[in-house]
Amino acid sequence: MLEVVGLSKSYGTGASATHAVQCLEFAVEELEFVGIVGPSGAGKTTLLKCMAGLLAPTSGQTLLRGKPVTGPPPELAVVFQDYSRSLFAWMTVRRNVLLPLTNKPEIRDPARVADEALAAVGLKGFEEHYPWQLSGGMQQRVAIARALAYQPKVLLMDEPFASVDAQTRAELEDLVLRVREQFGVTIVLVTHDIDEAVYMSDRVVILSRPPSTVQEILPIDLPRPRDQVDTKALPEFASLRARIYEAIMQPAAAAGV
Amino acid sequence: MAARLNALPRTRSGSLLLGAVGIALALLLWQLAPALGLVDSDNLPGASAVLSELASLAGTDAFWSAVGSTLAGAGLGLAIAVVAGVALGVLMGSSTIAWHALRPTVEFLRPVPGVALIPVAILVFGPSMQSDVFLVAFGCVWVMLIQTLYGVRDVDEVALQTARSYGLTHAQRIRWVQLPSSLPYIATGLRISSSIALIVAVTAELVAGNAGLGKSISLAQSVGQTEEMYALIVAAGILGIAVHVVFGGLERRFLHWHQSQRAGGDR
């Protein structure tokens, strides 16, 4: 579905250049949920922007169904961390969800699609509100509904729950797992939260310290549907999170070989 | 007593009351200054004489036609400045080519005081409405341009990336993201240039003799109608306040979604 092939991104040139990510290599299968974790400053967001076609990689590329990504592809949507900046304050919730559908002629009835997406995230009745009239968690739901209404094959999420409180975060995690099945999307989630990555993912890609490479790809063989209490109480959950924690904490030199 | 006085500015009616008291005191001072011989009443008639003159002027067609001419000149000039300024501002704010090509010219023309062009306007248009419109447009366009430019450049990076990630074209991003998000800047530009428009229009009428309040003021002065002159000056001031109120209302109407205008809706 989505392949990252030898992807590198450096900022600046020559001796003063900073290498954010280097020769990244991994693939995401259709309908898979892949979490990307790494120490802070590991270039997770850089990687996501390159995958989204928002940032041109220095070398290497991303392939979406075999085609190189050179600009934002119509089969792909992004949910950003900062919902208050990503949503358009001058538009109602419904207008926010409708705007991206402007260039999607294959969506015949955008109004219905928008309302269904809003209903799926539990925001029925808030269509005519403005984003700033809603709580943080509800605003991020609007952003998720907007992404779903766009009917993407791949949904990229950049730390989507980092700005909401712990309880809302758990609710939104379960919401995303639910709508993923309903809408049939492949999801790549960038997060700094190891628990979240283990709880939600089928596989977790662990990035090393910058210049970041793929340090390890860990399959998460936990049963689905996942449950905030039961899944997190499993001994496998604890051992998986411990393993990722150690991988992220150990110095890059010792990680190789 | 002191505590109750300090509490006054905190309520709307209290602050209105304080404002009314201030105006009454200013009018009283104006009334007393000539009456007590502090100033020559030939140069500055008392408030009551000027205000009653204004009341009788308000019953004449000549007065309203002067007000109409001033408003038409200022309004038309402002409209041209807004259209041209916003268009140029969007162009310069969203295209690096336009920015580099136009910036030197704009930087050269911008500091030229609008009123310095009055002789040019007289030469080209004569004492006519066109010269009013031209001078007002020139006086206002730079503020509109610069404000729009800043607004377009200040658009949130995340909002813009969101729009790009959803495949919105350059023109769609300008229409749906950059223009609305720069509205607060454009509104500030409008508020500033609406005052400039009135000042330039009245000045042009005073100097160039185009029909309007400015010309009426200079006429009244030249024939020694001091009370009428002051009444017209007061009228020009009232016009300024009215313009300010109208544009403030427009700002609230169109920027209801912006932080500065939200009435406790933020959660």
Image (cartoon, coloured by chain):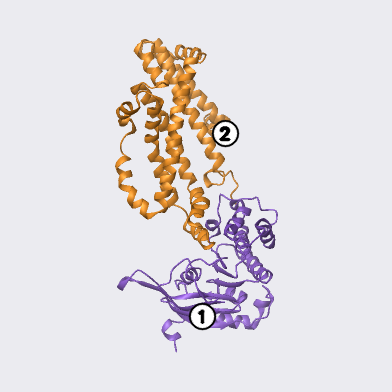
Q: Is residue A145 visible?
A: yes
Q: Is residue A223 above or below residue A94?
A: below
Q: Amino acid at mark 2?
A: Thr
Secondary structure found at label 2: loop
**Colour in which chain A is shown?**
purple
Between residue B73 and residue A26, name the one nearer to us. B73
Can you give x and y, in whole percent of width and height, for residue B8 in the image? 54, 31
Q: Is residue A196 above or below residue B216?
A: below
Q: Amino acid at mark 1?
A: Phe
In orange, which chain? B
Dot 1, crowdedness within 10 Å: few (<14), some or many (≥20)? some
Q: Is residue A38 visible?
A: no
The chain letter under disc 2 is B
Can you give x and y, in whole percent of width and height, for residue B33 in the image? 39, 14
Q: Is residue A69 above or below residue B228?
A: below
Q: Is residue B93 above or below residue B238?
A: below
Residue located 40% across and 34% down the image = B137
Q: Which residue is mark 2?
A: B11
